[in-house]
Amino acid sequence: MFKPLMLAIGLFLATTAAAAAGTLAVVGFNVDSDDASDDFIAAQLRMSEGIDIWGLSEVWQKRDWPETLRTGAEQGAGIEYGSVLGATGASNRMLILYRRDRLELLATEEIMEARATERHAAPLAAHFRSADGPEFMFVVVNFSGQAARREAQSAGLAAWAATQTLPLIAVGSFNFELDEDGEGDAGFDSLLAASGWSWLRPEPNIGTWCGDRGRIADNVLLGGDARAWRADASVMYPQNNYCPDSVRSSDHRPVLARFAFDGTAAVPDASMPERQIRPFLPGDMNISTGLDDLDADEAAAPVSQEEYDALKRRVEELEAQPSPATPVAAPSLAPAPAASAAPVAAPAPAAEPAQGPPATPASVPPVSEAAAEPSNDYEKLLKRIEELEAEVRRLRESEAGDCR
């Protein structure tokens, strides 16, 4: 029931917000496929607007991850996307998705001199010609978390960049130890000095990795004539409760960069969903239970579609009730529960069907019966979400054990 609606919304946005001529919008996103759902990440791509190129790292090449992500981008824009999947990396690859109507792919290469080890993916570069602008090189990277390897990768990337004559855009997880003031890692400064890169610093500049909330691990770098383009950058999903990540979401925040080639025109409109993504409601993900990627029986899922519908109505009621004392009434929590609230019965074990009838809107207490402060209800919802995510994690671990 949700898929036709989401596709219709995507097509509407595509026809009412066409890309501005002479501009470009790109996103670097470490999707953390070892500990995330491809359906969930695809939903993030699908609900975004105006993105010309996605530079995705840590993409699992199995179980149709690349195709699921490409399809998600297409459904959101209503436009065909091409894809380039890197050939290196044991299980996590680099993936570039690009709008075919605006960009022509001329060549690709993997920058082997900037590869961490034989097991890791090399940075992936794509040579594009814009339909209304210059040719340029787009690069997606995922540097090592170990300082010595990262320095070697930096040197390799600098050496490669020195041989290029086209404008350069590099996105991804550079994984330097930068704090929110942009200080703290001499290796980052050395990379910029050695290669001629410049850092397109986001505003606001906040931590991008959930493992260390203040650490700027993901960056956008510009080289060559790209440094003269008009540009800005922003860290997507700046809400505090994006971290820690769930069992479905990435542990990295994406970084969006917008460009106007001539240096004077306005940068294009482009965005990712303003609301909190951690968790998407099951309906927003076009799935009925939130556990479809586990091949789980619906009766074993933590929440039914009926329960989800009731919870969504409850959240909408709470958010329609203004309260100056409610600290979470901001759009970042617009419909946010992964699938549950306090009135919902606890999830059944994975091997047994859920007990009792599913919740209905009538079983959800009306606003007048809620606690005096709506924030208390939100706290209950979020607490229940955490319980459900723990159940999903348990089911994942159980399934993995059964496969051994």
Image: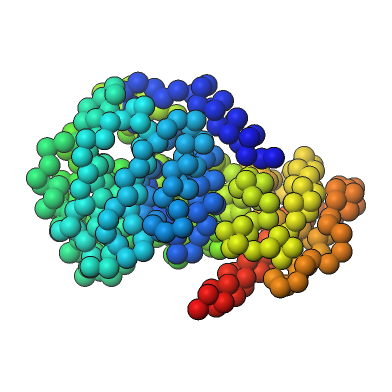
Can residue 228 be seen here? The reply is: no
Can residue 262 be seen here? The reply is: yes
**x and y percent of residue 324 in the render?**
74, 44
401 vs 261, left or right, is right
The answer to which of 260 and 304 lies nearer the viewer is: 304
344 vs 278, left or right, is right
**x and y percent of residue 4 in the render?**
63, 35
**x and y percent of residue 330 in the render?**
65, 44
Q: Quadrant of residue 226?
A: top left
Which of the image's four quarters has the N terminus?
Answer: top right
Please name the residue shown 50% across and 42% down the image. Answer: 72
The answer to which of 90 and 159 lies nearer the viewer is: 90
Q: Residue furthest left?
A: 163
Q: Is residue 18 above or below residue 61?
A: above
Please name the residue shown 17% across and 57% down the image. Answer: 112
Q: Is residue 100 above or below residue 324?
A: above
Please name the residue shown 59% across and 44% down the image. Answer: 275
